Image: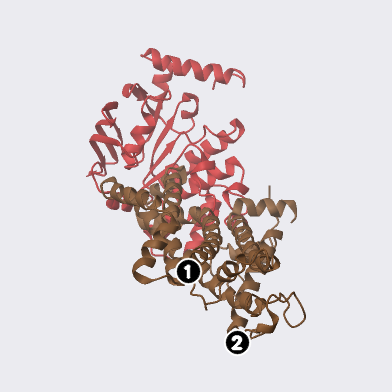
Chain colours: A brown, B red
Amino acid sequence: MAAEWTAAELAEIDISPGRRASWRLPGWLVRTARRPHGVFGLVVVAAVLIAAAVSLVWTPHPLLAADSSHTWAPPSWTHPLGTDQIGRDTASWLLAGARTTVLVAAGATAIAALVGLALGTLTASLRPRFAEPLVVLVDILVAFPVLLIAMLLATPFGGSIGVVVVAVGIGYGVNLARVVRSEIVRVNASDYILAARAAGTGLLRRLWLHVLPNVVPVLVVQLSLTAGVAILAESGLTFLGYGAAPAEPSWGRVLADAQKYIGVAPLSVVWPGVAIGVTVLALNLLGDAVAEALDPRLRSQEARDGA
Amino acid sequence: MGLEVSDLRIRIGRRELVHGVTFDVPTGERLGIIGESGSGKTLTVLAVLGLLPEGATAEGSVRWNGRELLGLPDRDLALIRGKELGVVFQDPSSALNPIRTVGAQIGESLSIHYDLDRRELRQRVLAAAARVGLPDPEEIVRRYPHQLSGGQRQRVAIAMAVASGPRLLVADEPTTALDVTVQAGILRLFDDLVGTLGSSLVFVTHDIALLGAVTDHVVVMADGRIVESGRLDTVVDDPREAITAGLVEAARVAAWDGGPVA
């Protein structure tokens, strides 16, 4: 039963701040990095972040440098991933497209988290009189597909990355609200919440210290799924014309352009497709790994297994 | 003074489940509430603490040191719960938050009701852990509930309940989920704690054999009513109601395996 604790873990879960000596990586991050799927997720996400950052100052070729003598060039030393229909460097576009991906994934996930946590907590905590209209509102919003929200927003504002971010954020935020609500209701019904009330814990403290931390693992997994879906939605919506403008680099844009010529240059569809697929997979695995790292029950199982 | 419950009625929806229960627990006294499952004993203590499940309502009167608790808003009750009233529930494996350390949970009521700095809080948590007989408090307060045995978890739950020095300790079947070998230790702990704190005790159980170790008075509940009450020894020796005789008999049969009835 007794788990082996490392000195770092002991200090971390100490109830006194007495020995909080120097800054160190948060424990959940360290534990995430100890899992194979966590490592994969972290590495890919870091690579995408670095690609996005690097593309701001350097790309192998200028984005708009079209070399009309080298259209559909196969992969080579000058063009590692080849060129597109007007001779632009695919590798440069994918590198720069990572910016959009990061923006969309982070923005949509942040909005979804905000919408989901706010609506989920309110519908689970308010008196039924106030909560029920909100629940109905959430149910109605859930019925709207993301595509429809994006179209509604694009009509007055025009298609843009912002539309994608807000549409995906709201669309998946309301789904998240239902998950958060049901999780809070489940946790609220547990004996340890009754015990916390018996200790005199008030509503806000109960939510913050007792209920929400028990919801976080589920929330993290849902958010990582949302980030993946947001990337896919950006590609899809851009493909349909509601997302990035033609000169704006985005993986969805590259994919949309390439698919018209899939018969001529099949490889050109593979690159953006692989970039999207691997990033989405990495986000999902990372979400799982973080959720496991946050749960003390799974954590000590790992310690027992000697992992 | 102490706890005075009179004509307490509890209903869930339209159904009345507890039909006018009256009992007193004067300061420093110990009362056992005994009854079969479904007799309303747990609902009764939950109502005393203002912890009835949603949809359940209580009428009548629950006075704590002269102050009416029924109908008090949750915010005001929260000031009394944990500080003056401590509770231990039946199943320690579900009554502890799986993702908070043992120390954080023992310190919960202290950090709510007292303005302590971290060092004082830590010391009082360690003292409470040691007081309930947890081995190696320094080390155990950093653990999580799933790393403890059932008996240790119940000791943690008891430490949570007594950390703030409550004037009334309520225990709802605190040994039911435990091994028989562990039960005796927990019962001794209750007896010892209530003695040193000088607080009152309400001990709910379906097993009358346990009461001898902790209380001297008993009320017997059946179908939401108190059917018999009095000193424990008189009730056990000379039960007036069939239901009480049944409970006494059940205790004797259960004790048979382990030797003569105490």
* Helix, strand or loop status at disc 1: loop
Percent across and percent down for residue A193 are 43, 47
Inspect the image, locate mark 2, and give the three-letter code of the amino acid beneath it.
Answer: Val
Total marks placed: 2
Which residue is label 2 attached to? A57
How far apart, in angstroms, are the residues tagged by discs 2 and 1?
24 Å
For mark 2, name the chain. A
Question: What numbered label is drawn on residue A15?
Answer: none
Near mark 2 (Cα within 10 A), the count class, few <14, some 14-19 or many ≥20, is few
Which residue is label 1 attached to? A243
Which residue is located at x 45 percent, y 56 percent? Answer: A212
Inspect the image, locate mark 1, and give the three-letter code of the amino acid beneath it.
Answer: Gly
A213 up-or-down from B226: above or below: below
Which residue is located at x 59 percent, y 40 percent? Answer: B150
* Helix, strand or loop status at disc 2: helix
Question: Of B124 and A113, which appears nearest the observer?
Answer: A113
Question: Of B144 and B168, which appears nearest the observer?
Answer: B144
- Pointers 2 and 1 within a single chain: yes
